[in-house]
Image (cartoon, rainbow, N blue to C red):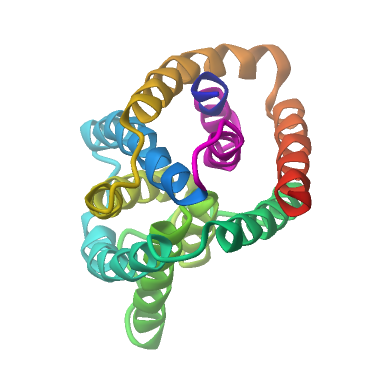
Amino acid sequence: MGLVAGAVNVIAGGGSMLTLPVLIFLGLPAGVANGTNRVAILLQNVGATWSFHRRKLVGWPWLRLAVPPALAGVLVGTWAAVRIDDALFERILALVLLAAAAWTLWHPIRPPAVGRAEPPAGASRWGLVAAFFGVGVYGGFIQAGVGFVLLALTSAFGLDLIRGNAIKVTVVLIFTPVALAIFAWNGMVHWPYGLALSAGTVSGALVGVRLQVLKGQRWVRQVVTAAIVVFALRLLLG
């Protein structure tokens, strides 16, 4: 599944929407699956962040604005995640998956051709701070689909897709260790599964590049959407 998720993340995004339910179907309690998934999230974002940083595509003014509220939010979201009942979490995850499937079909992200270098000022800036706090809460609580949310947010505030992706992977890389540490402290990480998943995502990223050339993004997006809907229905029906 890590192999599949790594390929999906390269081509269309949303790999966690596959790995998280599969970890549950493999027998992990929902909370442990949620924590275990963060191991792969952390490791796969290290390489991506370094690649963007090496090419000087990381917008530091945006990061200085985004990281503090996102870190505050992830504390709140992860605190809720380690305390929620497993059955309730599965229901919430199913609804999130269905919403993500609809989002994937609609595909509303329309980044500008040329992004702004600096984040907005005034009231818009405070709105952006609040939005990044919300992203942190969501990322700490469930993670799946947070990349879509971050890209939609950065695009709405003027970043082009490449620099938006740089902000996305860097913010996720910074707040994921916090969430993972909280899950681990509460005994909610299955390390062998997490490391196996991580190895798969790294290999899958290489496969994804070739698959994108052979089949194209649209075909993969359709397959992923169908799988997400099936997983969501399986979670809802128990």
- Give the x, y percent position of residue 171: 31, 52
The stretch in magenta equals 6-29
Q: Viewed as shown, does residue 76 lie left or right of 29?
A: left
| Relative vertical location of residue 47 with respect to residue 89 in this rendering, above or below | above
In the image shown, does 204 or 32 lie closer to the viewer?
A: 32
Q: Confirm whether the magenta stretch covers residue 2.
A: no
- Give the x, y percent position of residue 17: 59, 42
The residue depicted at 53 percent of the width and 13 percent of the height is 207
The residue depicted at 38 percent of the width and 18 percent of the height is 199
Q: Quadrant of residue 124?
A: bottom left
Q: Viewed as shown, does residue 106 lie left or right of 7?
A: right
| Residue farthest toward the bottom in the current orientation of the protein | 123
| Relative vertical location of residue 173 with respect to residue 123 in this rendering, above or below | above
The majority secondary structure of the magenta stretch comes to helix
Q: Quadrant of residue 56?
A: top left
In the image shown, does 119 or 5 lie closer to the viewer?
A: 5
- Give the x, y percent position of residue 66: 30, 64
The residue depicted at 38 percent of the width and 46 percent of the height is 35
| Relative vertical location of residue 25 with respect to residue 32 in this rendering, above or below | above
Image quarter hosting the N terminus: top right
Count of numbered badges drawn on the protein: 0
In the image shown, does 181 or 64 lie closer to the viewer?
A: 181
The residue depicted at 27 percent of the width and 53 percent of the height is 186
- Give the x, y percent position of residue 233: 78, 48
